[in-house]
Image (cartoon, grey):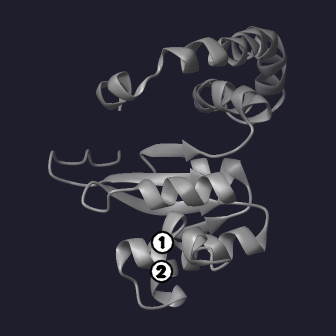
Amino acid sequence: QEPKPGPNEKLRVAIIGSGDEGQVLINALNPNYVQTVAICDIRPFNVHRAFHGDHAGDVALANRCGLMTKYGWKSEDEARKNVKVYSEIAECLANKAVEAVIIALPLQPLALFVLRSPIEFVMSKLLGPGEALTIVSLLYAPLTEEPAEWALLLMPFIRSLVTRRSAIPLA
């Protein structure tokens, strides 16, 4: 069993998607409260930018500084000792050090995966690998697909409710 973090420990996060949006979210992290322990991206250039920042210009670098600048690491080697790099989402989410996930991807394909992951985990623990798990997975798959589609349909409505004034209490 994993030890529970104390009240003064940093939240350990994984960032899924380190393109332009992921870079902006990295820039917004407060290293006093959040520790990035993993990043996941299929593009090597995005991984490089996640560590080094966006050097396309001064404005780009100011808005996308990179993990090395954010956490004060002197080299990419030092940064990689603290941040595990993944190209597969399932492997990233299986990292026991990850307590929360920042998603900077198009949501539709990921929504189904994220909704199913906890169910898959519980079922695999109860049933173990094999045919029984496959059969049960096929039975509950439709139950997770519809709520994922509803959540996506509600996103514009939810976004319309978030204002500058309400965003801070929500965070």
Give the secondary structure at mark 1.
helix
Q: Are marks 2 and 1 in contact (CB under 8 Å)?
A: yes
What separation in Å lies between label 2 and label 1 (alpha carbons)? Answer: 8 Å
Looking at the rendered structure, the kind of residue marked 1 is: Leu
Which quarter of the figure has residue 9?
bottom left
Horizontal and vertical percent position of residue 16 = 63, 51
Which quarter of the figure has residue 50?
bottom right
Horizontal and vertical percent position of residue 46 = 71, 68
| Quadrant (top left/top right/bottom left/bottom right) for the C terminus | top left
**Who comes first in sequence, dot 2 or dot 1?**
1
Horizontal and vertical percent position of residue 35 = 37, 60
Q: Nearer the viewer, residue 97 or 124?
A: 97
Q: Nearer the viewer, residue 143 or 107?
A: 107
Which quarter of the figure has residue 113?
top right
Above or below 159: residue 70: below
Question: Can you identify the residue that label 1 sits on?
Answer: 67
Give the secondary structure at mark 2.
helix
Above or below 45: residue 1: above
Question: Can you identify the residue that label 2 sits on?
Answer: 79
